[in-house]
Amino acid sequence: MSALYWERLLSYYSTQTIQKKLEKCYQNHSIENSSGLSYDNCYRFIYFLKHGENFFLQANQSPHAIQPILLFYGISQLLKACLLIKDPFYPSTSSVLAHGATSRKRKKQQYQFLKDEIKVQRNGLFSHVAKELFHIHDHLEAEKYSMELLLNQIPEMDTAFSFHQTKMNYVKVDTTDQLQIILTDATAQHYHMSAERLSEHFIEKYHFEPVNNVTSEQILLQTKYINHTFNCSPCAFHIEENAFYLPSNRDSFINLPELLVHYLLLYNLSMISRYETEWWYELLLGLSNDDYPIILRYMEIAKRKIPYFILAFLEEWL
């Protein structure tokens, strides 16, 4: 499936086309010197995109031991291409060049991957992407997320969690043909709310837009994005089922688009692969606990889902 997304991205490997599309995009945002900026950035855009693709294609052919490193650098390059659409001056300062996240450098005894945490830093690529691509400005600094919480934002992980932890972490959400979210009382009962109260929560906190109130027990909502699958947080799009899901636990709700979730997960996994070599190889060769199948399942999802999200963003904005 991921091969299809890379094939569709071939259309973006033309400076002739991309220069025109970037210029139009900059003009729509009233950016001065849109012609000159689009000419300069069309080459950078294609190079970032191609470099990201090469990292992902290489990951498919590489041992699991080094896949997190390749995938992390791959998503970083793809996000930089997306940034040039929204921020033609990227990088305007050196502060946006850092990764924007930090993880525990030395792992404790009896270390468990799912309990490990990652902390968001004030500056860097992560916060810049959050601001420019998702309009998230102020609440991420110093936020900490456990690996389990982040993995709970990815509905394709449900089969792995239900097998190893014998619990379901997701609630399926019905949608209309236009991919509008249908909130029902049956869904809202998982969170001890009415459909009306849950919809109010989505509108206030996640900036969903009400479509119409069919009844008080069934309410339609949609995101502000044209391509609803790109950012429907706190809902998540299941790429294998073409369906939307919500975390089944209220404590698992985070206002973090899934593309940013992948960035944080791959950052931590790449750090483990680079600096926690002993633990990493004991995991890969010893098969001693549930971390092994959960991490490998996640990486297979990431290989498909990240290029899908990047393509969805490009098709919306270019």
Image (cartoon, rainbow, N blue to C red):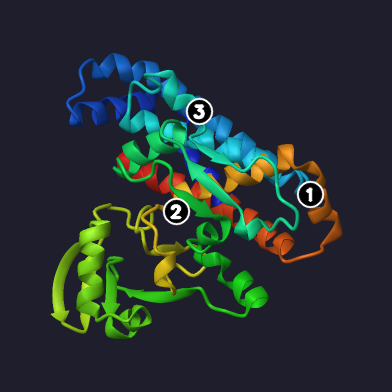
Disc 1 crowd rating (10 Å Cα; few below 14, some 14-19, many 20+) is some
* Residue 154 seen in this snapshot: yes
Query: Is residue 267 shown left or right of residue 142?
Result: right
Q: Is 121 drawn above or below residue 17 in the view shown?
A: below
| Residue for badge 1 | 279
Image quarter where the C terminus lies is top left
The residue drawn where x is 69% and y is 39% is: 58
Amino acid type of disc 3?
Ala
The residue drawn where x is 72% and y is 66% is: 290
Q: Is 137 drawn above or below residue 239 in the view shown?
A: above
* Residue 1 seen in this snapshot: no
Circles 2 and 1: CB distance less than 8 Å?
Answer: no
- Residue 29: x and y in percent read 20, 30
- Classify residue 113 by image quadrant: bottom right
Image quarter where the N terminus lies is bottom right
| Residue for badge 2 | 258
Q: Nearer the viewer, residue 245 or 313?
A: 245
Number of numbered discs overlaid on the protein picture: 3
Amino acid type of disc 2?
Glu
- Residue 315: x and y in percent read 36, 44
Disc 2 crowd rating (10 Å Cα; few below 14, some 14-19, many 20+) is many
Distance (Cα) linking label 1 and label 3: 26 Å
Circles 3 and 2: CB distance less than 8 Å?
Answer: no
- Residue 144: x and y in percent read 48, 49
Amino acid type of disc 1?
Trp
Circles 1 and 3: CB distance less than 8 Å?
Answer: no
Q: Earlier in the sequence, mark 1 or mark 3?
A: 3
Disc 3 crowd rating (10 Å Cα; few below 14, some 14-19, many 20+) is few
The residue drawn where x is 19% and y is 77% is: 196
Label of residue 98 in the image: 3
Q: Earlier in the sequence, mark 3 or mark 2?
A: 3
- Classify residue 128 by image quadrant: top left
